[in-house]
Image: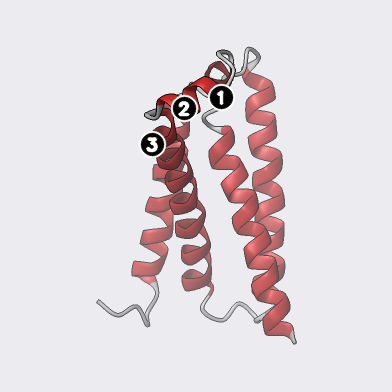
């Protein structure tokens, strides 16, 4: 039963990391508000991740954290790619309002967050002693 709760907490942590990396793309007039939201969700993600790891007594923690970070960054990259592909269709562009794209425009920060999460996840998986090459 602890293993099931640990997996559920890892999924919750992955969702919070997804929100953090998606928030990186948000254009915000006040930079402090954007970073405050990102830090708040990062703290929630770390708390959920630590609770999930504690239920498994921190066994294979590098593997678990690496998988959560890679999944969150991969899902965010896939979501951005899907939205970009949808923007290529004329029907979708007609359905959305013109100011919708103004909300997400900070590609530098969003891309950097995705790269940091993916790189850290890959390094943790690589550092795991049981990682097969």
Residue 54 in percent (x, y) is at 69, 75
Where residue 36 sits, quadrant-wise, is top right
Q: Which quadrant would the N terminus be assigned to in this image? A: bottom right
Q: Is 18 above or below relative to 14?
A: above
Marks 2 and 1 close (CB-CB < 8 Å)? yes
What residue is pinned by disc 3? 85
- For the residues carrying marks 2 and 3, which lies nearer the camera in this image? 2
Q: Is 77 above or below relative to 14?
A: above
Distance from disc 2 to disc 3, alpha carbons, whole Å, reads 12 Å
What residue is pinned by disc 1? 95
Q: Secondary structure at mark 3?
A: helix
Residue 43 in percent (x, y) is at 69, 48
Q: Residue at x 56, y 81 (%)?
A: 59
Q: Residue at x 59, y 49 (%)?
A: 17
Residue 130 in percent (x, y) is at 37, 82
Q: Is residue 34 left or right of residue 83?
A: right
What residue is pinned by disc 2? 91
- In the image shown, does 96 or 54 lie closer to the viewer? 96
């Amino acid at each position: 039963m602890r293993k099931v709760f640990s997996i559920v907490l890892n999924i919750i942590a992955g969702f919070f990391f997804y929100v953090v990396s998606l928030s990186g793309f948000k254009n915000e007039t006040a930079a402090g508000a954007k970073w405050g939201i990102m830090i708040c969700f990062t703290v929630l993600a770390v708390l959920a991740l630590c609770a999930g790891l504690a239920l498994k007594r921190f066994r294979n923690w590098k593997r678990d954290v690496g998988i959560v970070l890679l999944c969150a960054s991969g899902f965010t990259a896939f979501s951005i790619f899907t939205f970009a592909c949808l923007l290529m269709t004329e029907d979708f562009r007609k359905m959305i309002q013109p100011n919708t794209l103004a909300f997400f425009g900070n590609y530098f920060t969003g891309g950097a967050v995705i790269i940091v999460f993916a790189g850290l996840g890959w390094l943790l998986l690589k550092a795991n002693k049981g990682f097969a090459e």
